[in-house]
Image (cartoon, rainbow, N blue to C red):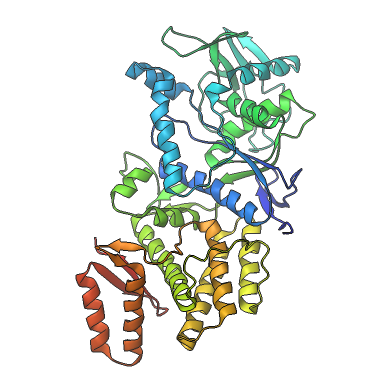
Amino acid sequence: MSLVPFVFQNSKSGKKEPFLPKDPTNVTIYSCGPTVYNFAHIGNIRSFLFVDVLRRSLLLGGYKLNQSMNITDIDDKIINESIKRKVSVEEFTKPWTEAFFKDLETLHVQKLEHYPKATESIEDMVDFIEPLKTNGLAYEKEGNIYFSIQNFKQYGILSKIDVAGMKSGVRYDADEYEKDDVRDFVLWKNQKTEEEKCWHTKLGKGRPGWHLECSAMIRKVYGSGVDIHTGGIDLLFPHHENEMAISTGAYPEEEFVGTWLHCEHLLVDGEKMSKSKGNFYTLRDILEKGYDPNSIRYHLISAHYRSKLNFSLIKLEESKIAMERIQNAIYRVLAAGNLWDQVPEDFDNFNFTVPELQNLNLEFIRSLADDLNIPKALASVFELVRIVNQFLDANGDATQDAFLKESILLFYKINELFAVFQFKKKIQTLDGISEEWILEQIEQRKTAKQNKDFSTADRIRKELEEKGILLADTKEGITTWKKAQ
């Protein structure tokens, strides 16, 4: 298939720019991954799902990807917790790393090509410091090695931070620090206590600073820079600014990153997530409340990645209803055309012949190519739902192979992005009742209402309720269902 031209809002320029990878058959993408000291909260989860949306969109656009997400398994928090619990860093981080990958699997996040760990890249980090020293950007003080911001004239170009008022020679040893406070940051820390995890290197006994880790892992995996670098907006400064300073300072002849993409914050009930406010959630917290992973995924990817997402349990229910509207339309098409389990072999190169479906296919892909505009892409999905329901209402049992087959083909394509919809027959829901049977009852009820046979319609609703299935009629005339809690 021919490549779809994408445009992205590049954080460095602050503008939408055409995406021009060095090699479309080997697009290099690096994403900042988790610091594995606890379960990821849903704000973290949103940023990981954003990476998945980016990946799936580019694949739908015809690109071949070579993608990485790092695992930060050494930093101040990890060391302090491992000492507190009297276990090694490796013992401490292992279950949290496994939990992270389990979360990704639960939410249908595609596996990437590389997951480099910080602890497996120490020598790469040590090697990075030598060119920084050669270029006058690194200096030693009391056994630690720092990056000199004053000697790097491009500092602030990514985050637009003002360095004019910074105090020369003021340093930070901590991995993380307050926003808008510009000081020389640590590249390498000497061992302070015997309990503290360290490595024996040519720099002596110590460990890397957080900001050095990503630069070294990118070079370890790719040998140079990358086409796209992603992360949450909270990483823009200081982490990404410092990362760019390290990489550009060490290898000024190379372009470090072509396009920077940053995912906005997640709010909970309109407020910043906080344990003290009681609005702090991990994925497991939400699953334990009985919510479906598919609804969670749908909700967390439905907003534009550059917009704040206001998460709430009420909005999660709304997302479930919206998702069920799409799912019900899929099942209607599958049943009408007897297309169950007929997975298309190659929809990438398929040419739609039905004009409405052809236009919706183009709208969907163009929305993704426009800086991953998921809300706009969803508008085309719900237009497809409307057209499908209108067609089936008008034609009843009469079939039009082209329309039905191309409709389900488009739904399959849409699901390559959303990864939440089902195409199999007789999915068991509860007590042996299949989803297909439930949808048949909904159709019978709809027919009864159209014939003004309201007693039959009420009887069907009541019978479903007795089986633990609740119906909801939308203002658009679509009926959705859910299990009773």
Image height check: is 372 above or below 82?
A: below
Asked if residue 421 lies left or right of residue 403, the reply is: left
Q: How many marks?
A: 0
Is residue 247 shown to the viewer in this render? Answer: yes
Question: In the image, residue 469 lies at what x, y percent?
Answer: 26, 68
Q: Quadrant of the C terminus?
A: bottom left
The quadrant in which residue 451 appears is bottom left
Foreground residue, 183 or 428? 428
Asked if residue 83 lies left or right of residue 17, the reply is: left
Is residue 280 shown to the viewer in this render? Answer: no
Image height check: is 269 above or below 344?
A: above
Foreground residue, 184 or 394? 394
Foreground residue, 77 or 146? 77
Q: Quadrant of the N terminus?
A: bottom right
Question: In the image, residue 293 lies at what x, y percent?
Answer: 39, 52
**The furthest residue to the left:** 466
Asked if residue 454 lies left or right of residue 244, the reply is: left
Question: In the image, residue 307 lies at what x, y percent?
Answer: 53, 53
Question: In the image, residue 185 lies at what x, y percent?
Answer: 59, 21
Residue at point 61%, 74% (across, down): 357
Image height check: is 27 above or below 254?
A: below
Foreground residue, 264 or 347? 347
Residue at point 28%, 51% (across, down): 289
Residue at point 28%, 91% (across, down): 453
